[in-house]
Amino acid sequence: MNSKLGLSEQKIARARELAAAITEPVQAHITGHTTVTVERATLRMLGADGVNADEVPVPNLLVDAFSDRCAQGVARPYISTLLARDWTPADLNKAVADGCELGRVQPADDAAVRARAAELTGATFERIAQNVTTRNERMARYAANEKSPLLYLIVATGNIHEDVNQAQAAVQQGADIVAVIRATAQSLLDYVPHGATTEGFGGTYATQENFRIMRAALDEAGARQQRYVRLVNYCSGLCMPEIAAMGAFERLDMMLNDSMYGVLFRDINMYRTFVDQHFSRMINALADVVINTGEDNYLTTANAYEKAHTVLASQLINERFARSAGLPPRLIGLGHAFEIDPDMKNSFLYELAQAQMAREIFPELPLKYMPPTKFMSGDIFRSYAIQTMFNFASKATGQSIHLLGMLTEAIHTPFLHDRYLALENAEYVMNAMADLGGELEFKKDGLMVRRAEQVLDRTLEFLEQIATIGLFDAIEQGLFADISRSRTGGKGADGVVAKKDDYWNPVEDALKHALGLGA
Amino acid sequence: MLVRPYGDTRDDGAVQLSFTLPLEDSACAREAARQFVLKLGFETCELVHAAPVSDTHTFFVAYARTREGIDPDQVAPAEQAADEALTFEEINTFIDSQIGRKLLVVGACTGSDAHTVGIDAILNMKGYKHHYGLERYPMIDAHNLGAQVPNEKLIEHAVTVNADAVLVSQVVTQKDAHVRNLTELVELLEAEGMRDRFIVIVGGPRITHKLALELGFDAGFGKGTFAEHVATFIAKRMVARRRTHNP
């Protein structure tokens, strides 16, 4: 790709150095800690599943039962129980769901525990590898029909069966990616609900069964249209690693998965989120899942023109955390958004400059471009015009994942024909100007080139500041999105546990081995 | 005098419509769409566009004409708790000059509701869409108790800190749980003889001022509310109350 902006390579390299310096102390914290959801995800990867009569998930019941051994890892008592009772994971799931008290478990012979762990982990990894193979085969089969950018639509009825109807219609209309929006408060639940669900406010619960239902529906609709339709859910909140595990089991293709979103926008404890995001990203890397980060959120709450540098800074930090968790560039879908006030003079030029800047700084990454939402009103005709400009910017700057804006944004969750109109608009614009990006050069020292330089310079200043005080303090002082979160505050803090020297987690060890991360 | 929709000529009654029917696109579906519009009471209907949005659904655009009219002198807008909000500066000046001390506001999402987006938009420093929350107001001391706060706890806190106003946010409204919850709060306050001690306000996407008054609240705020609407109401009501109580 020829550079249109001519940004300084030295500055970009310096920004990456700073991001590495910023994340390094956090990574040290991550290595030394586990959390209740990391332990539950570990158990899920070893076969734990199901719920009891009160809808409490078996992984939660098990981690509670072994709560005094979190610091050493719950895998050992879990596998010791299987060995002591000569149970399969399914037997144990049923017994725990039926209310069986496990009592004090004597640790079994170390070699036997390790052998059983290797067997269970191997079976799970094999299942996930099979999903990756299936996905790759289908993507290859339909490669000729793949659009660029991929068009991303959301469904959010609260009822998984109604979501299926809407998603299948969206596929027929041309969607390449379908995201099932999660029920509003799920991110704050310290467990993952179970089974098919038909009621949810603002969205549909992320459950493994709902994942399975939607996966089957998209495979079916995609085959009819000769496309591989990607399924997205939310690997965020208090159960990031568990959602990652479930997504890996059910062949989800993308996950919303940000290293700081939960801390800033959901008031989740920072120590908790940093540990959780790392484990969840290792699972996503194993499952070849593209993560989508949430930088668009910085702009929906703040002035998108003034705070553009916070997006780039967060992208660099997210990229560094993702690389540390074994995600290759092709799986890191950094987010950004088209949110500058449309009444500002030349707003579109600034949008174009920023989108191009993201493309040039992250040339190999599947960038996710989010549509305008903040300035959408009940004037659906104006909103539709703004969405057209967004579609234009996305195609002209070679974005990868394009979340379609709705003309009824800010009014209701999309109607069937709202999605149709969004797709019709995008397909028209992106076809009509298909190769324009390759024809365009930006004027040297012009408005757009200078704007991109300005954002990069401010990003460097901002990253220098964060590197000086450290990421934990930077968040406490409200440097991101003007939101201040204390180290000890936030939800889920009590679920963070310092690992003891004899901590053992066979799933983590296997993940590190598979991803080539130093154990 | 009656007025009618205006397309290009006075009283032509022209209306544009778009909708989807759960029918496969066909001549029959188009005729069904046209007749459906006529059934709504329109005199004429020109179906200008039909497009399949799935195998089983078709999207239509239609222009229709009506003879119906409306007399604007015979309508009254729904009563709003705050149609004219003062600005951030005006509110602080107003409280300072008219009341002469900080107002204390306590807010929470009550009952099983875990959705803090509404109460945060009104209370948090940052506010919403460039409208600062009450925490940022120099003349307001705001306490955000967060989500899933029992009504009893909210009242207890309001009494402890001697609040002037109590804000309740209700976002989830499935099966009318919010109405029961809101009624309970008012009943608890009345049982304790404290209903008049506080200005009690409810907000949420499905809340209207009318509903709030019916439930015994002082005001209700729905979609599109910002902190200054709530602050204006509280400040003005405080002044009005003082006049009534201390003539």
Image (cartoon, rainbow, N blue to C red):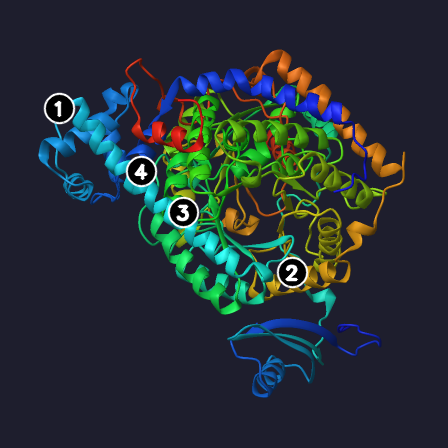
Asked which secondary structure carries label 3, the reply is loop
Asked which secondary structure carries label 4, the reply is helix
For label 1, the residue is A104
For label 4, the residue is A45
Question: Are dots 3 and 2 on a single chain?
Answer: yes
In this view, the mark in front (2 or 4): 4
For label 2, the residue is A422
Q: Earlier in the sequence, mark 3 or mark 2?
A: 3
* Mark 1–mark 2 distance (CA, rounded to whole Å): 58 Å
**Residue under the point 21% across and 31% down:** A115
Q: Is residue A423 left or right of residue B143?
A: right
For label 3, the residue is A206
Relative to B212, say whether B14 is above or below. Answer: below
Q: Label 2 lies in what chain?
A: A
* Mark 2–mark 4 distance (CA, rounded to whole Å): 39 Å
* Quadrant housing residue A454: top right
Q: Amino acid at mark 3?
A: Ala
Q: Earlier in the sequence, mark 4 or mark 3?
A: 4
Neighbours of disc 2 within 10 Å: few (<14), some (14-19), many (20+): many
Q: Earlier in the sequence, mark 1 or mark 2?
A: 1
* Quadrant housing residue A69: top left
